[in-house]
């Protein structure tokens, strides 16, 4: 992506959790030198929050509760 000087942009980050506990990640945006001028490296700490859980599958089975 290209972000011009004194401008801003939005970056969508999508994550699909396989676990109930929160996950953490680090997003690094590293600049390229343009005309001998170095830009800043931006670092973001990302933390997930599980708000909704959908079952992957539902299984039905029958078995006796007790057998002699």
Image (spheres, helix red, strand yellow):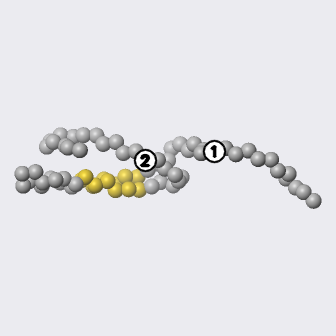
Q: First in sequence: mark 1 or mark 2?
A: 2
Q: Residues within 10 Å of mark 1 (few under 14, many from 20)?
A: few
Q: Quadrant of residue 55?
A: top right
Q: How far apart are marks 1 and 2 (CA)?
A: 21 Å
Residue 15: assigned label: 2
Residue 44: assigned label: none
50 on left or right of 9:
right
User: In this figure, which residue is indicated by the disc labeled 1?
Assistant: 57
Q: Is 1 situated above or below 66?
A: above
Residue 59 % position (x, y): 70, 45
How many labels were placed on the picture? Answer: 2
User: Which residue appears at 45% of the width and 55% of the height?
Assistant: 23
Q: Is 18 situated above or below 11?
A: below
Residue 14 % position (x, y): 40, 45
44 on left or right of 63:
left
Q: Quadrant of residue 9?
A: top left
SS class, disc 2: loop
Residue 61 % position (x, y): 76, 47
25 on left or right of 30:
right
Q: Do the residues labelled 1 and 2 touch (CB within 8 Å)?
A: no
Residue 30 % position (x, y): 22, 54
Quarter of the image that includes the C terminus: bottom right
Task: For marks 1 and 2, give the one nearer the viewer.
Answer: 1
User: Which residue appears at 16% of the width and 53% of the height?
Assistant: 32
SS class, disc 1: loop
40 on left or right of 47:
left
Q: Which residue in the rendered view is the most extreme toward the left?
A: 35
**Is residue 3 or residue 62 the one in the foreground?**
62
């Amino acid at each position: 992506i290209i972000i011009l000087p004194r401008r801003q942009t939005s970056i969508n980050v999508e994550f699909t959790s396989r676990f109930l506990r929160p996950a953490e990640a680090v997003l690094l945006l590293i600049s390229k030198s343009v005309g001998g001028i170095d830009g800043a490296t931006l670092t973001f700490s990302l933390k997930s929050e599980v708000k909704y859980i959908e079952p992957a599958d539902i299984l039905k089975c029958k078995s006796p509760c007790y057998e002699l």
